[in-house]
Amino acid sequence: MKRRDLLKGAGAMTLGAGLLPLLKTNAFAATSDTAVVLIGNTINSLDIHRPGTNRPSYQVAVNCYDRLVSFGLKTLPNGAQVYDYDNVIGEMAESWSFNADRTEITFKLRADATFWDGKPVTAADVKWSFDRALALGGFPKVQMAAGGFKRPEQFVVIDDKTFQIKLDQPSKLSLPNLGVPVAVIINSAVASANATTADPWATEYLHKNPAGSGAFKVSRWQAGQQLVYERNDNWACGPKPALRRVIIREVPSQATRRALIERADAQLSFSIPNKDAKELSANDKVKVVGTPIDNTLHVVCMNQIFEPFTDANVRKAVAYAIPYAQIFEQAAYGMGAKMWGASSAKPTEPVWPQPFPYDTNLDKAREMLAQSGYADGFDVQLAFNLGVADWAEPTALLIQEGLGKIGINVTLNKVPGANWRTIALVEKKLPFLLENFGGWLNTPDYYFYWAYIEGNLFNASNYDKAEMAKLINDTLFMEKSNPQYKPNVLRMIELAFEDLPRIPLYQPTLESAMSPVLGGYTSWYHRQLDVRALKMG
Amino acid sequence: MDRVLVVFKRLLQAMPTVFGIVVITFLLTRALPGDPAVFFAGPAATPESIAEIRTELGLDQPLPVQFGRYLNDLSRGELGASMTTGQPVIQELVTRLPASLELTLVALVLSLCIALPLGVLAATKQDSWIDQLCRFVVTAGVSLPTFFTGLLLVYIFYYLLGWAPPPLGRLDILYLSPPHVTGFYLIDALIDGDLEVFWSSLKQLALPAITLALFTLAPLARMTRAAMLQSLGSDYVRTARACGLTYPKVLRTYALRNAMLPVITTLGMVFSFSLGANVLVEKVFSWPGIGSFAIEALIASDYAAVQGFVLAMALLFVLLNLCVDLIYTLVDPRVKIDG
């Protein structure tokens, strides 16, 4: 009998020992100059130019490096602070000037700006960095090209503090494109010292060791776990950040992130689902900030090389059958801007995005379908990316239900995130899909360039119209003040209304939850966290 | 001496298996839908930029050439770099495998401490309350998904009561990881003599380990009970009793010892599947383990990472099976393993 008692006791003791550590914990108390930020993804590189660097890593470029220019800030009616696309301000550049025909931009660099190691920032560093963005190819090269920067010869060092860019043609996108995350200025001396003949651009070194002049340095990076920013007290390109240290923790589980922010163990949960944003806004211990994302739309694409969608009446029937309001309530939780129900098919303002002249009207939808070659309806697969299932899945289900009412039998095709880009955007072989492109540069023609020209990546609908392509190419570089700009954009929008390769559902928002004491949170077009302006209390 | 030879022979025998696994994972990763070049070309990719990335990754080469390169790298001990985390795969394995192993081992020890007594008691007192309790625990353990148990524990002990530390991985934000020796924070902290870090990592371990223990408890308790029932009903136990040996002596020496073999087999199996299955626990507790790494790599068609992971797991299983077989010979001298 004794043996059994012993066994029993041992079991109970082990259980007790397991629970014991739970009894004594003191909650993590942040000091006023340290903030803990939660993100759901992995930062996989500290070098934005390196092939394979993922989106969440762009925040390192934002916080650790400077660009020639940046954007001013403005406050939305709801009190949220956002960047202001129309107000380009100097970051590393103190001033700049255009020549008469606007094909040369000359920048004067800040005299007092130094890299972290104390070396002054020179025009040669800027040229080296821009050359690198082109040389490494991939996304940085594509993004540089959007501003008209295609060849290294275009970047000219005039003297130590004067840098010039020569353009093939004047473009309204050139200056703002120098403020995007890829246009960073790297310490070329440090990088060159760590370059090898096989790796002349020091991708291996800069991948793990940023060498910049920005407001924050990286003091610790454990991919898959955390990244710790430490303030650079000598930052010359802006007001000294209020926070001394920012700890970015990767927490994959959404439920865990929510528990942490509600328990105030973290100060900011960056980019949360709308459902959580809605529920957390009722909690007065957490502040939720949401802002519409510029030049971004959640849309339904109808691929025009597939049979039923070649018929314009079918596309209109679909546009009248989509339950927009329900989608907005149940998939977006009422957050965002509505993109349906415009009163006129003739746009009057050259703004984008703007509501399309369609609303849920089943009679009209049936009428349109009756006029098409598919009066009895048809079967079609609606595809969506499982990586964005939080909005796409409820949206797809509601569209399935809505189209079912007019005799279009929709089945759902859930595509895993890894396959999505290949199938939907590169091969463009999905007939009917949900898509969510957003343009970094906030002009209508920039959106149209990526989404409405045959062959361009985000034109998943294979939309091909010579008039549209010509309009876009004519307008893309044109200044907004050009008298031709407004009529061109209006015509583009009118064509988009009429031809319907993409039906917008709503303009999404970026929601973040934070501690009420955290201030200075700013929403950017690049949807990355800018920790430079954050402050506590 | 004999045993050493056996171990050596067994390892030699495992070579073809491991090579087969290398070939199969190579082919399987290539057969995955999705194109890593597209995935890694970034948001605004053009056909040219995708082609550039493809060349960069060496994916424009024919499969045999890619395989040759892979073997060549392997022979030099290079597993390539993971595109998803941007780190060399070998480094990921070195830091993440101990994290998963530490969690799994602690959970298994915990689970054994409960399952063995519970199973033995349930078998000796059939249909008593303790047998019913055993049944309940087993059913609950198997039927509750680990992420659910994990979230429930987080909700109660962290969110509501505030007893548990924030579920933020292996250490509290305030502490730095101990110097790397074994990769097991509990051991490394003790080697370093830093009790504070030891305590912190133990606290972080508690909830995920309990979650995993609840899950692994079921098969172990069930198997202990069944094996004990069988050996208690056997002739040798009856003989032992008839000889007048005390009940504890009969239970320990004759019944339990004979019942251990199936339990050890189950333990080996539970250990191997929980290493893979704790990915959901890792996600809930932000545990930087091998499971979540593998899942992320799979989603991104990250060839090097998936291959490295499968290879590491294969080697681990070979070693594990060997250990289980060796333990057999210790428990039961009649068992012989063939070289």
Image (spheres, rainbow, N blue to C red):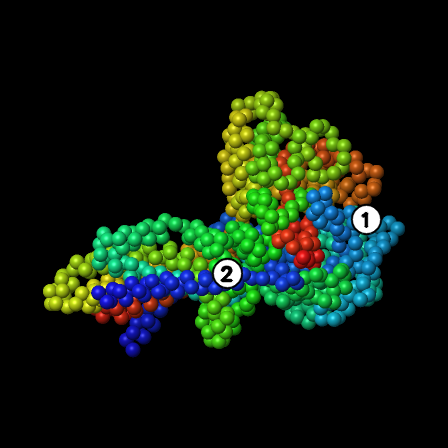
Quadrant where the N terminus of chain A is found in the figure? bottom left
Residue at image point 44% right, 50% down: B148
Single out the mark in the foreground, 1 or 2: 2
> Does residue A343 appear in this view?
yes
SS of the residue at dot 1?
loop
Residue A204: image quadrant is bottom right
A23 displayed left or right of A517: left
Q: Which residue is mark 2?
A: B165
Quadrant where the C terminus of chain A is found in the figure? bottom right
> Does residue A498 appear in this view?
no
Residue B201: x %, y % from top left:
48, 66
Give the amino acid type for the residue marked by disc 1 in the picture: Pro
**Local crowd size for mark 1, using a 10 Å CA cut-off: few (<14), some (14–19), many (≥20):** some
Is A280 rendered above or below residue A464?
Answer: below
Is A525 rendered above or below residue B316?
Answer: above
B134 displayed left or right of A173: left
Q: Chain of mark 1?
A: A
Residue A511 or residue A224, whichever sits in front: A511
Residue at image point 75% right, 54% down: A70
Give the amino acid type for the residue marked by disc 2 in the picture: Pro
Q: Chain of mark 2?
A: B
Residue A343: x %, y % from top left:
70, 28
The extreme left residue here reads: B242
Residue A393 or residue A196, whichever sits in front: A393
| Labelled disc at residue A170 | 1
